[in-house]
Image (cartoon, helix red, strand yellow):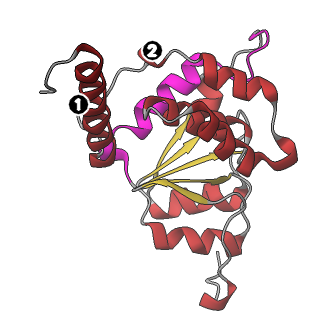
């Protein structure tokens, strides 16, 4: 692949920082957008759609020695009923995101919205976000492509399915400690005792 000048760098479609060391974007990337990925120092690309990534992204992953995790291919199921994605895809995706040695990590799907938005929404649920905030974030990326089934899946997703890795990112550990502290304080207020 011929090297592009720096002024041809372009931010990928649906790109955003999810949390420190975790990014998201569409899996269909041009050469100009690939150049932007160099700034992230990626270790892992997590692919959620059944389709493989664009040729440019595939070549980039190979050239840079980035670990590719293609869950969309291994966890795809044809008979999901109303569910837009399988619980196994989301469970394994979350376990990959929450495994600090995989960072910096890029989450992609063909649209950058459906599977990625659902996975990020379920991450927010694990982070104890208010459901309205989760839906707001999902819709801000989905625009007109958003689906009610995705929002319902996020709401009904059983966070207890996720096995937390032993090496959690600092941002997640910190949020969990803050949430536990808040729960203890609420309990103490309700029961008239002092929070520990």
Residue 28 sits above or below residue 126 on the image: below
Residue 23 as seen in the image, left or right of residue 118: left
For this orientation, the residue located farthest to the right is 144
Q: Position of residue 99 (x, y in %)?
A: 34, 38
User: Could you tell me how many numbered marks the image carries?
Assistant: 2
Q: Residue at x 55, y 30 (%)?
A: 122
Q: Position of residue 32 (x, y in %)?
A: 69, 75
Instruction: Inspect this view and state whether residue 178 appears.
Output: yes
Query: Is 58 or 106 nearer to us in this picture?
Result: 106
Of the 4 image quadrants, the one containing the C terminus is top left
Q: Which residues are magenta?
A: 80-103
Of the 4 image quadrants, the one containing the N terminus is bottom right
Q: Residue at x 71, y 28 (%)?
A: 151
Which residue bears the numbered disc 2?
A: 161
Instruction: Inspect this view and state whether residue 48 appears.
Output: no
User: Which of the marked residues, 1 or 2, is nearer the chain's N terminus?
Assistant: 2
Q: Secondary structure at mark 2?
A: helix
Marks 1 and 2, how far apart at CA: 16 Å
- Dot 2 surroundings within 10 Å: few (below 14), some, or many (20 or more)? few
Q: Position of residue 170 (x, y in %)?
A: 27, 47
Residue 145 as seen in the image, left or right of residue 140: right
Which residue bears the numbered disc 1?
A: 166
Q: Secondary structure at mark 1?
A: loop
For this orientation, the residue located farthest to the front is 192
């Amino acid at each position: 692949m011929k090297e592009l000048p720096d002024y041809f760098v372009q931010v990928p479609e649906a790109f955003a920082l999810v949390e420190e060391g975790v990014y998201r974007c569409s899996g269909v990337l041009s050469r100009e957008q690939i150049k932007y990925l160099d700034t992230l120092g990626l270790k892992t690309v997590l692919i959620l759609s059944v389709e493989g990534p664009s040729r440019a992204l595939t070549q980039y992953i190979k050239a840079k020695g980035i670990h590719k995790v293609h869950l969309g291919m291994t966890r795809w199921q044809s008979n999901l009923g109303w569910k837009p994605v399988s619980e196994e895809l989301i469970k394994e995706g979350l376990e990959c995101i929450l495994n600090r040695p995989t960072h910096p990590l890029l989450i992609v799907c063909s649209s950058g919205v459906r599977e990625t938005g659902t996975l990020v929404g379920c991450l927010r649920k694990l982070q104890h976000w208010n459901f309205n905030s989760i839906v707001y974030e999902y819709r801000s990326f989905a625009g007109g492509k958003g689906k009610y089934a995705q929002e319902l899946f996020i709401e009904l997703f059983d966070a207890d399915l996720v096995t937390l890795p032993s090496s959690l990112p600092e941002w997640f550990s910190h949020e969990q400690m803050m949430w536990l502290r808040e729960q203890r304080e609420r309990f103490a207020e309700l029961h008239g005792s002092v929070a520990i």
